[in-house]
Image: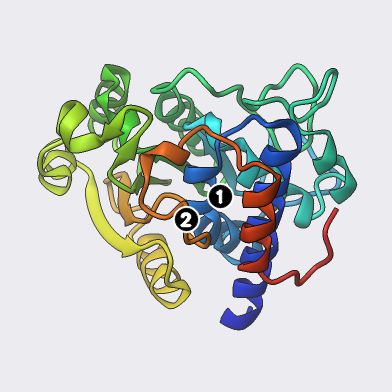
Amino acid sequence: MEIVKLEGIASQVRRDIVRMVSDVNSGHPGGSLGCTDFLTFLYFEAMNHSASPFSMDGKNEDLFFLSNGHISPVWYSVLARSGYFPVAELGTFRKLSSRLQGHPSTDKKLPGIRMASGSLGQGLSNALGAAQTKKLNNDPSTIFTLHGDGELQEGQIWEAAMYGAANKVDNIIATIDFNGRQIDGDVENVLSLGNLEAKWEAFGWEVLSMNGHDFKNIREIMTLAKSRLGKGKPIVIIMKTEMGQGVDFMVGSHKWHGIAPNAEQLEDALKQLEETLGDY
């Protein structure tokens, strides 16, 4: 897909995000906006996946697991925009009985969701299990997973990292949203992660880095990551992003981790984001 088209989809997804959280005065816009370009590229170019018919087992297709489930607005938008459920359903986000709960859940049977997430730290374990299942079933597909940088303060992540390397789970590409922010402030001040590249390398993973807001660089690094699959090591990408990307008063501030824009702020945000596919 042409980069200009990917940029157009990403702009619409960002419009969806700010409208969804503003409509119910609840949700997590900061990280969602920061991961928009990555998830747009993942679903509209990188992954081999099928929106219809959707199957939980996902045989012979690539699977994605969102570990930092609080950024559900961006995932819901991308799923809807790629055909998993009607775009109009985005208007039910976080409302009573909605399938679009604040954190992704499987009990509502929303197409595209294969794991409940919200309790941080669990996604890599689930993704590695899915990756091993693919191997056991001689399914050549790839597992993709996304994690927040603050989430790496959870010990289960590092248990899973050890497991993945020790068992040579080499059909997985994990990505870290490295925006340096979490709900209480800068990650460095809350609990420093140190040298992430060196840590993951020490745990036995192949480490790549990319700019999460540059589609050309995303394509380059994702292509490289795919070329390194099947070589005995799991792969992790350290993705540099900005929380709140695309909305000038949100960019780079942890304060927008979990606060919704009011009506005036929403109007300001929408003026900065081009409507390309039609609002829901």
Regarding residue 136, the answer to whether it shows in the image is no
Left or right: where 234 falls relative to 81: left
How was this image coloured?
A: rainbow
**Residue at (80% x, 42% y) in the render:** 90
The quadrant the N terminus occupies is bottom right
Q: Residue 61's mark?
A: none
Left or right: where 150 falls relative to 47: left
Badge 2: residue crowd in 10 Å (few <14, some 14–19, many ≥20): few
Mark 2 residue type = Phe
**Residue at (60% x, 73% y) in the render:** 7
**Residue at (65% x, 48% y) in the render:** 18
Mark 1 residue type = Ser
Left or right: where 230 falls relative to 36: left
| Residue holding disc 2 | 249
- Describe the element under mark 1 as helix, strand or loop: loop
- Labelled pair 2, 1 in contact (Cβ < 8 Å): no
Which is closer to the viewer, label 2 or label 1?
Answer: 2
For marks 2 and 1, give the CA distance.
40 Å
Query: Horizontal and vertical percent for residue 160?
Result: 31, 25
| Residue holding disc 1 | 141
Q: Is residue 221 above or below residue 33?
A: below
Whichever of labels 2 and 1 marks the residue nearer the N terminus, that label is 1
- Describe the element under mark 2 as helix, strand or loop: loop
Residue 241 found in image quarter = bottom left
Tell which of 272 and 61 is nearer to you.
Answer: 272
Badge 1: residue crowd in 10 Å (few <14, some 14–19, many ≥20): many
Query: Horizontal and vertical percent for residue 225?
Result: 36, 61
Regarding residue 228, the answer to whether it shows in the image is yes
Query: Horizontal and vertical percent for residue 262?
Result: 65, 41
